Amino acid sequence: MDYDCHNNDDNRHRNSHDDRDRVDHPADNDHPHPIPVAFLWENAPRSCTRPIRDDVLVYSHLPNGIQLLDDKWALARLLSPTANRPRRGHFVALESHCFRGREFAAFAERVGLTEEETEADATTRDGRFEDLTDPSSPSSLRPPPPPHPKNLWVVKDASSNGAGGIWIADPTNARRFASPGPSAATTTTMLHPDRRYVAQRYAWPPVLYDGRKCHVRVYGLLAADGRAYVHRRAFLHVANDPFDHRSPEGGESSFEASVHITNCCANSHDVDKFAGEICVDLGAPGPFSKAGAGDADDDDADDDDADDDARFDPDKDDIPLGDYLPSIAASLAALAERSAPFLRGGEANSGFEYLGLDFVLSSVPDDDGDDDVTTTAARDVERIQPHRRHRRTPVAYLLEVNCPPSQDTATGLARAEKVHDEVISDLLRRMVLPRLGICGDGGEEEDEEKEGAECDGWKCVYAPPPPPAHPSNRGKETVPIAPSKAA
């Protein structure tokens, strides 16, 4: 429970106690003896709670968690395909570049944004985007999607959240971002010269919802012991206008926010276009699984029945997107593994980080095998063989992380509220209540802690390997780092 910063100094010093499920309140005339804080939840750590964080039994953050995970600059560096210890399998990452506003011109030159787009580079050939509302769209053998634009980027303010601080850049409008100044230095016209920015290559091909761009808000957990979990309940957020990535004939691209921005809160103002809060089930097999089953020789298969099963009512049904879970889990596992050295110190107060992870759904040709898949590799395959029908693998590209994510709904719909309630209830049962002795034995069953195990709605997607045995470590006790010292 949250801590009142106006409590007196005596209330900051907490001792062990037995009644851990009692409500905390400040010491006053009615309660002369302050009750210790068992569980401290904060949206962001505050300086006034620093003295008590080491002594609480459970805390809602890891040392350095928000500073590292909620920062787009740090996230881009952690998940870069060139980072150390790349994970194999379903992990995909967008090509990303970090720079200050005044360095945009150097970035543009490095990736060729300042070069004139040739006719061969322009996206002129028609193709087919997968659409979650089209039951005939998923097929293990399908025509290729429209070819990836050679230079289409999303530029983000590294410190902003929500729909602000996002721009789309391509060769037709790159000069609006930077113009030469009076000296050799470059003066930026749209970006603050000293602020940090991240440019991500546009996730391609995007999976659409009713012809519009979308992303999935996934809920995850990072625990102090290094384990990572993903919840099966999620949301689909949809842009307000139909997706169109093409530049006008001979003109500058004008990228409308209503086409590219999928932020739910930013789009809910337009009630006529807003798609609503669409619930997702990451534990249910999705269209790719059904398509794969359809490839088998089955004389009794009824295509019409399959199409009927694929249709859903977003007001009543959850969209089954379990096909994308392996890729989502691989991204969270990579994030847990690569961020672990910077998040140490949460064991003493059973810290955890509650994450809202935003993923764009896509697919890549199976030709890439089992190695890490980058947008560059997927692009090259389709350019070399543009007309070949490819077997494609569903993937999800991680765009950003919010910690903690908002628990407010944009519509107040009962189904959306139920998802939030379920996720938070499962979080309390997984991370908090056992450690307070309120339920369970204070620890998790061994089989539930293994990678791939599921408890309630949470699935363990990463468990760190045990530390190597070393003779010099035998008989030594490990003293946890005080969280307030680690942060």
Image (cartoon, rainbow, N blue to C red):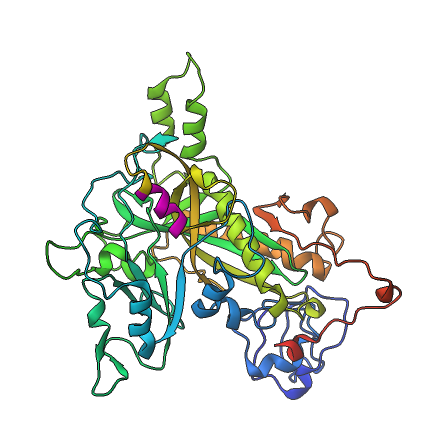
Instruction: From the viewer's side, name the closer residue of 80 and 197.
Output: 80
On the image, the x and y values in percent for residue 383 come to 31, 43
Residue at point 54%, 79% (across, down): 46
On the image, the x and y values in percent for residue 238 come to 31, 51
Reply above or below: 65 against 140. below
Q: Quadrant of residue 314?
A: top left
Evaluate whether residue 443 shows in this view.
Answer: yes
Evaluate whether residue 320 shows in this view.
Answer: no
Q: Is residue 357 rendered to the left or right of residue 192?
A: right
Main SS of residues in magenta:
helix
Instruction: From the viewer's side, name the closer residue of 296 and 351.
Output: 296
Range shown magenta: 376-383
Q: Is residue 408 rendered to the left or right of residue 210?
A: right
Residue at point 70%, 68% (across, down): 57
Reply above or below: 146 against 97. above
Reply above or below: 281 against 432. above
On the image, the x and y values in percent for residue 251 come to 11, 59
On the image, the x and y values in percent for residue 52 come to 66, 78
Q: Is residue 401 rendered to the left or right of residue 459?
A: left
Instruction: From the viewer's side, name the closer residue of 43 and 73.
Output: 73
Instruction: Based on the picture, tell me whether residue 186 belongs to the magenta stretch.
Output: no
Residue at point 71%, 74% (across, down): 481
